[in-house]
Image (cartoon, coloured by chain):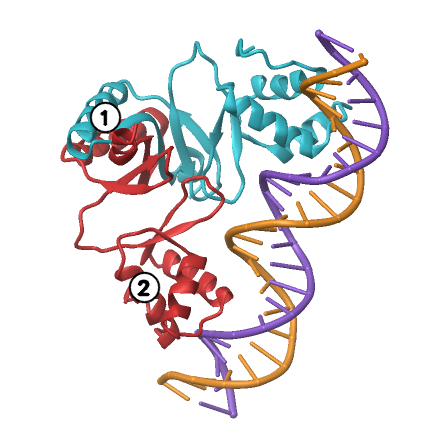
Chain colours: A red, B cyan, C orange, D purple
Amino acid sequence: MGGKGIRITRKRQAILDVLKNTDEHLTAENIYFILKRKNVKVGLATIYRTLDLFYQNGIVNKINIGDGTIRYEYVDKKSVHHHHLVCIKCGKVMEYTDEKEPAFLEELAARIKKNYGFSVLSHEIYLYGICKECNEGE
Amino acid sequence: MGGKGIRITRKRQAILDVLKNTDEHLTAENIYFILKRKNVKVGLATIYRTLDLFYQNGIVNKINIGDGTIRYEYVDKKSVHHHHLVCIKCGKVMEYTDEKEPAFLEELAARIKKNYGFSVLSHEIYLYGICKECNEGE
DNA sequence: TTTCATGCAAAGGTTTTGCAGTCGC
DNA sequence: GCGACTGCAAAACCTTTGCATGAAA
C-alpha cells in the first residue's frame, strides 16, 4: 500500500475499498453501515483505528467541515489535488480544482516562509457558499 | 455590539472581553478557566451558548483545526482578513495575511461560479507545516 | 411582570481505550 | 508461538439540552 509495511488484512482492505469506490466523503459510521450492508462484519472501533492508521500513512485525507464529524477520502496519487466547496444550505461537500490555484499556492508558501519563517507542508481550502442546486431552487 | 439587539449582560461582556484581549484562538474551556482565574463565575454551558450567539451574529469566528475542539476568535471589523498557519509539531495556530491572496481569492470565486455554479460566500484556508520556533529547535 | 439569561446536572454524539480472543506469518 | 489485529463494552471527550432559579427591561 503506502509501502510503509502496514499489514493489510481483509478488514482493512474492505475499508479501503469502500473509500476507493466512492466520490463522497465518508464518516466512520458511513463506512460501518456500508460494510454491514455488504455483510462484512467490522467493528466501529476497528474502522476508527484503521482510518487513523491510513491517515498516518498518507493513504487517506481527513475532511473536517466543522459539523462535529470527521470525513475521510482516499488519496489517489494520480488524481489532481483538489479542495472543497461546502454548501451552507444543504450541507453538501463537493470537490473543485482550479487551474491557477497550484501556482498561487506555491508562491504563497514561498512568501509565508520568507515573512513568517513557517515551512508550509500541506494546505486545506474550504469555500463556503450556495451550490448550484440550492441556487436554482430559490 | 452587532447592532442586532442581543442583550449584553455582564457575563457576555466578560466572555467578549477575553476574546478581545488575546491574540490566541481560544476554546470554550480556555475561556472558562481564564474567567475562573479572574473570579468571574460563568458556567461552561453559558460560554457555549454565548459563543454560539456571538457566532450567529458575526461577532466571533469559529476556527476548526481538526483536533476535536472548536476555537473562537473575535472578529475585528477594522482588522485585515487573515487565515491560519497550523504547526503540526507544537500545535500552535498563527494568523497570516498575504498581500496577493485577496485578489487571488476574488478571481477564484469568479472561476468557481463559472465552472461549478457555486456562489462563494466565505472561505477558510489552513496551511499546515512547521513553525519558525520548531524549525530552529531542530 | 414578563422575558430572557444562567447554572447545574444529565444527556447526546463521536471517538478512544482496555482487554480478551483471534488471526496471520 | 509471537505479535499484531479485532470486537465488544466501557470510558472519555466535547458540546448541547432540560429545568428550576435568578437577573434584566
- The location of residue A83, given as percent across then percent down, is 27, 40
Residue B69 or A65: which is nearer the viewer?
A: A65
- Residue A84 occupies quadrant: top left
- Residue B88 occupies quadrant: top left
- The location of residue B119, given as percent across then percent down, is 26, 27
Q: Looking at the image, which residue is at 26% across and 61% down?
A: A21
The chain carrying label 1 is B
The residue identified by callout 1 is: B109
Within 10 Å of disc 1 (Cα), the crowding (few <14, some 14-19, many 20+) is some
Q: Amino acid at mark 1?
A: Ala
What's the mark number on residue B117? Answer: none
- Residue A15 occupies quadrant: bottom left
Q: Are marks 2 and 1 in contact (CB under 8 Å)?
A: no
The residue identified by callout 2 is: A18
Q: Looking at the image, which residue is at 35% across and 21% down?
A: B97
Is B111 left, or right, of B75 in this rendering?
Answer: left
The chain carrying label 2 is A
Is D21 left, or right, of A100 in this rendering?
Answer: right
Q: Is residue A9 visible?
A: no
- Above or below residue B38? Residue A1 is below
